[in-house]
Image (cartoon, helix red, strand yellow):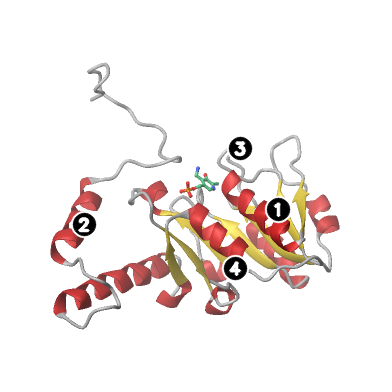
Amino acid sequence: GSRATGAPLVYLDSAATAQKPLAVLEAGRRFETECNASAHRGLYGLAARATEAYEGCRARVAAFLGSSSPESVAITRGTTSALNLAAQGLALGPDAEILLTEMEHHSNLVPWLLAARRTGARLRHIPVLAGGTLDLEAFERLLGPKTRVVALAWVSNVLGTINPVERIAEAAHARGALVVVDAAQAVGRLPVRLAECGADLLAFSAHKCCGPMGLGFLAGARQALERIEP
Ligand code: PMP
């Protein structure tokens, strides 16, 4: 119940951050009390258990995204941190154009603004039509030989619009551009298949899917992840 009123609490803001089921809290407690040690950094039993749990997490996330390769998942602090990793680590220069949409969350705007400022790359924006969908004709016009990255939300947190990621990615790939997808509102709500959705890099936050705050991932094929200079 609500502490403030004593009335039963109905929580309807799960798209922003979900409440955690007891099973999630219990799994976190179990890790901390039974497995916690330095993953990949110790040769003793407890460290091996920590490594196993850490790698098990990557494998499960990969499987959830339809991938059999744990290497396709890099654990991050969440969507914002994953998108920052991509924007800061991809090679860009004064000749490059970064194509975003007008409906991006700040998480998928500010990192690219900073990258553009740092590298001299140019930001361009796909307009949104009156009905809340992307102007795909404008997208085709904006997409050019200089487009190095197309970065967009799969599902808009403001409009609820589901963007045609696969179609956009097909056009972007034909121009040799890398497709970065903010999947904060997509994973857990839509069936997300890493290899088929068109995203080269896909960012997500666990707290939007009943998981812990401060945890998430950047997923993609190994070749795409390796284009990011850490
Ligand atoms: N992108 C979208 C579309 C979102 O809805 C959110 C969360 N509201 C974020 C990015 C940012 O997620 P986080 O704060 O977990 O990094």
| Real-space Cα separation, disc 4 to disc 1, in angstroms | 17 Å
Q: Do tag 3 and tag 4 residues touch (Cβ < 8 Å)? A: no
* Res 184 label: none
Task: Provide the residue designation for mark 1.
Answer: 100
Question: Does 6 sit above or below residue 44?
Answer: above
Q: Is residue 5 left or right of residue 160?
A: left
Q: Earlier in the sequence, mark 3 or mark 1?
A: 1
Question: Does 86 sit above or below residue 16?
Answer: below
Percent position of residue 5, x then y: 26, 16
Task: Provide the residue designation for mark 2.
Answer: 27
Q: Is residue 228 left or right of residue 48?
A: right
Q: Do tag 3 and tag 2 residues touch (Cβ < 8 Å)? A: no
Q: Do tag 4 and tag 2 residues touch (Cβ < 8 Å)? A: no
Q: Is residue 183 left or right of residue 96?
A: left
The type of residue carrying mark 2 is Ala
- The residue positioned 77% from the left and 47% from the top of the image is 135
Local SS, label 1: strand
Local SS, label 2: helix
Which image quarter is the N terminus in?
A: top left
| Crowding near the residue tagged with mark 4, few <14, some 14–19, many ≥20 C-alpha atoms within 10 Å | some
| Crowding near the residue tagged with mark 3, few <14, some 14–19, many ≥20 C-alpha atoms within 10 Å | few
Local SS, label 3: loop
The type of residue carrying mark 4 is Gly
Q: Earlier in the sequence, mark 3 or mark 2?
A: 2
Name the image quarter holding residue 20.
top left
* Mark in front: 3 vs 4: 4
Q: Earlier in the sequence, mark 1 or mark 2?
A: 2
| Real-space Cα separation, disc 3 to disc 1, in angstroms | 16 Å
Percent position of residue 120, x then y: 77, 61
Q: Do tag 1 and tag 2 residues touch (Cβ < 8 Å)? A: no
* Res 159 label: 3
* Res 89 label: 4
